[in-house]
Amino acid sequence: MHLDVLDLRQFYYRTRLGRTAQAAIRSQVTTLWPPETTKGETVMGFGFAVPMLRPYLAPARRVVGLMPGPQGVMHWPVGMPNVSVLCEETLWPVETGSVDKLICLHGLETSDHPSAVLDEVYRVLGPGGHVLFVVPNRAGMWARRDGTPFGFGRPYSQGQLDSQLRVHGFVPERKATALYAPPSSHRFWMRSAGLWENMGNKVSPVLRGGVFLVEASKQIPRPARPSTRGLVRNPLGAVLDGVSVPEAKPI
């Protein structure tokens, strides 16, 4: 079940914990996708991905934030022309193959139809397109606390997410983790959040982050072509077919 857009906005823009989470995740997003590399590209987000899209507003040719109907929509970005769109969860108003990069945040784990969402992601991505999924880590602390958006929906393990992506035609390529500090608004944790992120990125097998980031590319299936063996079961027979066999004459 999708969260309400008002609750998501309240968390990410009006709480210290939400702003800290936003900064930590966006740091990993921009490391994987530096803003300057999106020049001339179409960058979209699905779910509540707009906090991650701001760095791409200037360099990208087009930026759009898709927000599913069950969640609701809000004007974004503030003080600028709106680029957010309310859409059906599994039927986006986007031309097939028109997206270069897509960020999915609070769009997969909260959906009642994750397979259909993945099919729609596959449809809108163009050749060479990439998608970045940000999902709660089922082994992390953030997925166990209802006070944050990461405590809702179905958290994933790394293997579960990889398997689901491959089934739907994606090839996982690069991975990252974020949110190593506990999901607490206590002053100590807020002040040391940057230190925890730096430590976690170096020893992530020991410190389990609150979210996974998985970059995947769209796999283009190889065209199915009939094999030569299937077309010609008996090549020699086909060559000799129609050649008259001389009759034996008596001596």
Image (spheres, rainbow, N blue to C red):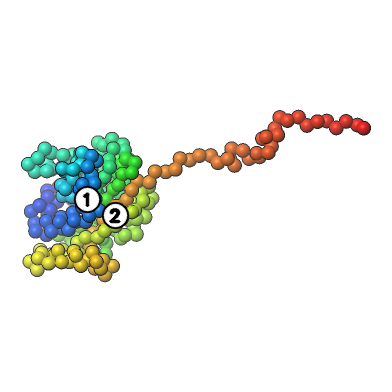
For image coordinates 36% across by 51% down, the residue present is: 171
In the image: residue 81, left or right of residue 142: left
Alpha-carbon neighbours of circle 2 within 10 Å: few (<14), some, or many (≥20)? many
Q: Are marks 2 and 1 in contact (CB under 8 Å)?
A: no
Alpha-carbon neighbours of circle 1 within 10 Å: few (<14), some, or many (≥20)? few
Towards the viewer: 146 or 244:
244
Q: Quadrant of the C terminus?
A: top right
Q: Nearer the viewer, mark 2 or mark 1?
A: 1
Mark pair 2, 1: CA separation: 15 Å
Query: In the image, residue 106 lies at what x, y percent?
Result: 22, 51
Examine the rendering and report whether any part of residue 33 can be seen.
yes
Q: Label 2: which residue?
A: 214
* Mark found first going from the N terminus, 2 or 1: 1
Query: In the image, residue 4 lies at what x, y percent?
Result: 15, 48
Q: What is the residue that sits farthest to the bottom in this orientation?
A: 206
For image coordinates 38% across by 46% down, the residue present is: 219
The numbered mark at residue 57 is: none
In the image: residue 35, left or right of residue 96: left
Q: Label 1: which residue?
A: 34
- Give the residue type at disc 1: Pro
- In this rendering, the answer to whether 202 lies above or below 84 is below
Examine the rendering and report whether any part of residue 68 can be seen.
no
- Give the residue type at disc 2: Val
- In this rendering, the answer to whether 224 lies above or below 171 is above
Q: Secondary structure at mark 2?
A: strand
For image coordinates 27% across by 62% down, the residue present is: 138
Q: What is the residue that sits farthest to the right in this orientation?
A: 251
Give the number of callouts: 2
For image coordinates 45% across by 40% down, the residue present is: 223
Query: In the image, residue 61 lies at what x, y percent?
Result: 20, 39
Query: In the image, residue 88 lies at what x, y percent?
Result: 24, 40
Q: Secondary structure at mark 1?
A: loop
